[in-house]
Image: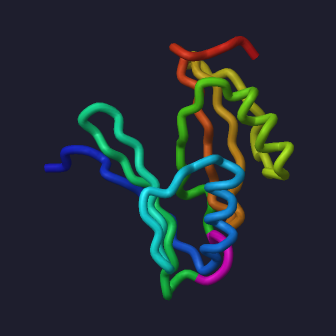
Amino acid sequence: MLEKLSGIIVWTDNLKDLRKFYEQVLGLTPHSVREDFIAYKWNTGKTEIRFNIGVHSKVKGGSKDPFRTMINFDVSDINEVSSKLKHNGTKFIREPELEHWGGIVATFEDPDGNIIQMLQQPSSRNEL
């Protein structure tokens, strides 16, 4: 059956603004760039995970149901990253908050209204 998660694609009709957000605001570096599709990847040992953004003919406007799916990115210092994102005008839905499982979570939106969560895992957690 399923062996691992290989990647996620966020479809848009606004690739220019999404690219600017994911690269200039979140600091992602593209692995490959085509006119209508951009791939970012992480190699973690034997696992490669891709995060992609691309243009899709059936996607128009912002996210219609933004809370249906949340994209999670791990960070080592959630307070530092949150401050930088706020400085760049990122709209936060939830400020960094300690969870019952020991990690810290903060939630914000990308330019299309997709929901993104930053997670600071308990092993790398600093005190709020």
Residue 26: image location, x then y, percent: 65, 48
Up-down relation of residue 62 to residue 89 (above or below)? below
Image position of 41 (left or right of 115): left
- Taking the spot 46% from the left edge, 75% from the top edge, the residue there is 34
Q: How is the image coloured?
A: rainbow
Q: How many badges with numbers are in the image?
A: 0
Image position of 64 (left or right of 89): left
Residue 1 is one of the magenta-drawn residues: no
Residue 61 is one of the magenta-drawn residues: yes
Up-down relation of residue 98 to residue 14 (above or below)? above
Q: Which residues are magenta?
A: 60-64
Image position of 51 (left or right of 25): left
- Taking the spot 50% from the left edge, 72% from the top edge, the residue there is 54
Residue 31: image location, x then y, percent: 43, 57
Between residue 93 and residue 45, name the one nearer to us. 45
Farthest residue, direction left: 1
In which image quadrant can residue 67 be found?
bottom right
- Taking the spot 76% from the left edge, 46% from the top edge, the residue there is 93
